[in-house]
């Protein structure tokens, strides 16, 4: 007679198998849940970045990603995704600023061109009327010429500003006698405004620097022209220059109307003009051009002004 087993499965084996199956099931379930939540944690920022980039591509520069992670005082970012979110927010902010500047630029250009064109149309209509005397026609033609010259100067300055904004390197490097160049600019502007009683006080040491001569001349022309524009006839424009250990320093100081403190921060902005009464004399690009040229030449400019007493522009150029 065949011997019969007492147990089909021993309890310790049964318990071991059941324990192993239970642990494996628990591990799979808990691991799956943990993996799911971990995936959501990493995928959500990517989805938010994708949404923000799509909105920016459509022209919505006001979109921002909400960074909810708790950051440490010892670290700028939680991880690489947090840094990506911060960079996308920064890009959107910069693009919003550029978009505002573009719209402001278009608005300013439209305004600057519209005014002289409207004046030219008005004078032309007067000339077309019957009974206009030859003397009046000559006067109207002179006014039309002045307005056309104003548009020409605006276009020239805009082209110059555009070239400078897109230029990163200075291609010409020549030894320039800066003191002699400034004296030539004074003579040139004095002849241009012949009949104006303007005095100059020049105190220029022999100065020489290796740079782009055309760019340097544009700086002096714009600064001296501005000083003349905002000074009364008969006043003195003081121009001084000296050598420094780091380079050269030139100052142009007038005895004009000065600049109010609240406006001094904007004088280098494109199309900004402090004095409404001088809008016909310029278009607010001169100082913007000067600042951009000095950025290319590794130089700087500072403004000191007292309202009612005059303005002093100081230029520093490194050798």
Image: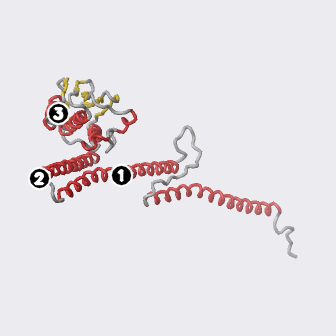
Image mark for residue 171: none
Give the mark nearest the N terminus, 3 or 2: 2
Of circles 2 and 1, the one toward us is 2
Q: Please name the residue shown 19% across and 23% down the image.
A: 205
Of circles 3 and 2, the one toward us is 2
- Circle 2 SS class: helix
How crowded is the residue under tag 1: few (<14 C-alpha within 10 Å), some, or many (20+)? few
Give coordinates of residue 97: x percent, y percent: 41, 49
| Residue for badge 3 | 196
How crowded is the residue under tag 2: few (<14 C-alpha within 10 Å), some, or many (20+)? few
Q: Please name the residue shown 52% across and 41% down the image.
A: 76
Residue 14 sits in which quadrant? bottom right
| Residue for badge 2 | 134
Give coordinates of residue 171: x percent, y percent: 20, 42
Q: Nearer the viewer, residue 72 or 217?
A: 217
Marks 1,3: beta carbons within 8 A: no
**How far separated are the C-alphas under marks 1 and 3?**
38 Å
Give coordinates of residue 243: x percent, y percent: 23, 24
Q: Please name the residue shown 45% across and 49% down the image.
A: 93
Marks 3,2: beta carbons within 8 A: no
Q: Please name the residue shown 20% across and 56% down the image.
A: 126
Q: In the figure, 218 relative to 150: above or below?
A: above
**Number of marks drawn:** 3
| Residue for badge 1 | 102
């Amino acid at each position: 007679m065949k011997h019969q087993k007492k147990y089909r499965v021993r309890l310790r084996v049964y318990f071991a198998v059941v324990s192993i199956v239970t642990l494996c099931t628990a591990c799979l379930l808990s691991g799956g849940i943990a993996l799911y939540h971990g995936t959501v944690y990493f995928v959500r920022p990517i989805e938010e970045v994708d949404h923000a980039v799509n909105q920016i591509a459509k022209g919505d520069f006001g979109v921002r990603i909400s960074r909810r992670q708790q950051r440490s005082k010892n670290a700028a970012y939680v991880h690489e995704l947090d840094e990506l979110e911060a960079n996308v927010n920064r890009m959107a902010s910069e693009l919003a600023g550029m978009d505002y500047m573009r719209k402001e630029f278009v608005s300013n250009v439209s305004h600057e061109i519209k005014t002289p064109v409207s004046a030219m149309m008005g004078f032309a209509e007067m000339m077309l009327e019957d009974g206009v005397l030859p003397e009046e026609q000559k006067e109207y033609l002179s006014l039309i010429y002045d307005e056309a010259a104003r548009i020409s100067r605006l276009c020239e300055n805009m082209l110059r500003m555009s070239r400078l904004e897109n230029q990163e390197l200075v291609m010409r490097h020549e030894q320039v006698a800066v003191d002699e160049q400034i004296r030539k600019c004074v003579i040139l502007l004095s002849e241009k405004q012949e009949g104006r009683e303007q005095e100059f006080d020049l105190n220029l040491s022999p100065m020489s620097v290796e740079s782009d001569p055309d760019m340097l001349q544009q700086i002096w022309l714009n600064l001296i022209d501005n000083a003349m524009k905002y000074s009364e006839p008969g006043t003195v424009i003081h121009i001084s220059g000296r050598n420094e250990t780091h380079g050269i320093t030139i100052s142009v100081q007038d005895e004009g109307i000065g600049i109010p403190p609240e406006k001094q921060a904007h004088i280098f902005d494109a199309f900004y003009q402090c004095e409404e009464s001088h809008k016909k004399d310029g278009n607010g690009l001169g100082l913007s051009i000067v600042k951009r040229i000095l950025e290319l030449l590794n130089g700087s400019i500072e403004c000191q002004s007292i309202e009612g007493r005059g303005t002093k522009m100081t230029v520093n150029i490194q050798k």
